[in-house]
Each structure stands twice: as C-alpha cells, then as structure tokens.
Image: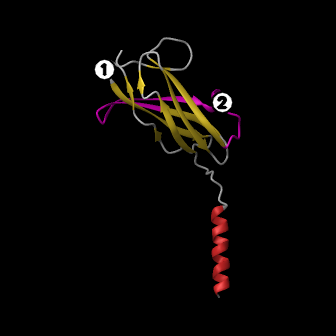
Amino acid sequence: MKTRILMLSALIFIVACNKDKFTTIPQVKISSISPSIVNNGNIITLKGSYTDDEGDMDSVLIVYKWYNGVTVVKNDTFRYNFESLGVPDKTREADIKVTFQYNTANPGPPTLPGVIKDTTATLGLILKDKKENRSDYKESEPIRLKKI
C-alpha cells in the first residue's frame, strides 16, 4: 500500500512539473520602464515579455494613464497590430520593447503629449490574440512627466 501511494505521489509530481508554461490566454509581464523622470524630448522605453500557447497574437493595446495624486485624470489607448511590429507568426514567447517620444514633433516613435505641470504617469499592456483572448492588464511602475 505504501508503495502505491509513493508511486502515485511521484507520478503526480512528474505530471505537475511537466506542465507547459504557455496558456491559451496570452500572458504578459512588464519588466521595466525608463527613464523614471521624463523631460521634453526624452525617449520612454517600456520593456516586457509575453507567452501564448498558440502563438496567434493579433494586437498590443498600450494604455497610458496620467494621475493627479491617485486619481486618473487622462487615460488613452494605442493599438498596434502584431504584424506591424515584425513579430513572426506562431511566436509563442518573445520580449516586447515599446518606445515613445515625450513632447516632440520628431519623426520616429509615437509621441506622448507634454503636460502643463509635473505629472505621474504609467504605461500598461494588454495583448489580444486572433481568437479574441485577452491577457490581464499589466502596468508599469509610475514615472514622472516634467512640465513643458
């Protein structure tokens, strides 16, 4: 009897350890945002990673929020198609790097508008696959946008 219990326990342990780390619903993590204090003309870089079992990613929703204390005073979302980001089809796991310019009119990365007083902000990510599965919303650490 003890041998059966021991073998059953070992089998459960092996099966549990062999589970794939990918899920049908996309998973996203944010690892960093920089700089922590943003002046006019700075490039804001948001880094993270994702996994998706089918590798059928469709789009990235980038949410930015500006705060007055703890209250969100401005909220907007940018949508990017995965094809435009150059991610090959069936990519199940990858790093993500999103860049924005702060208060510029330069060509290149998208621009976040300037603020009239120093403001706390966050950037967040939601990933959506072709079957309309959405990841949980993940948000960066707060950064400080300096006034114009």
* Precedes in sequence: disc 1 or disc 2: 2
Q: Amino acid at mark 1?
A: Lys
Judge from the rendering whether residue 106 lies leftward or rightward of residue 37; answer left or right.
Answer: right
Question: Which of 38 and 63 lies nearest the eye of the viewer?
Answer: 38
Which residue is found at the position 67% from the left and 29% from the top? Answer: 86
Q: Quadrant of the N terminus?
A: bottom right
Location of residue 35 with respect to 4 vertically, above or below = above
Image coordinates of residue 95 in percent, x first then y, are 61, 37
Image coordinates of residue 118 in percent, x first then y, are 32, 23
How crowded pointer 2 is (Cα within 10 Å; few <14, some 14-19, many 20+) is rated as few
Which residue is found at the position 63% from the left and 46% from the top? Answer: 52
Image coordinates of residue 61 in percent, x first then y, are 52, 34
Which residue is found at the position 65% from the left and 55% from the top? Answer: 20
Badge number at residue 83: 2
The residues bearing labels 1 and 2 have C-alpha atoms spaced at a distance of 37 Å
Badge number at residue 117: 1
Location of residue 134 with respect to 117 vertically, above or below = below
Mark 1–mark 2 CB contact (< 8 Å): no
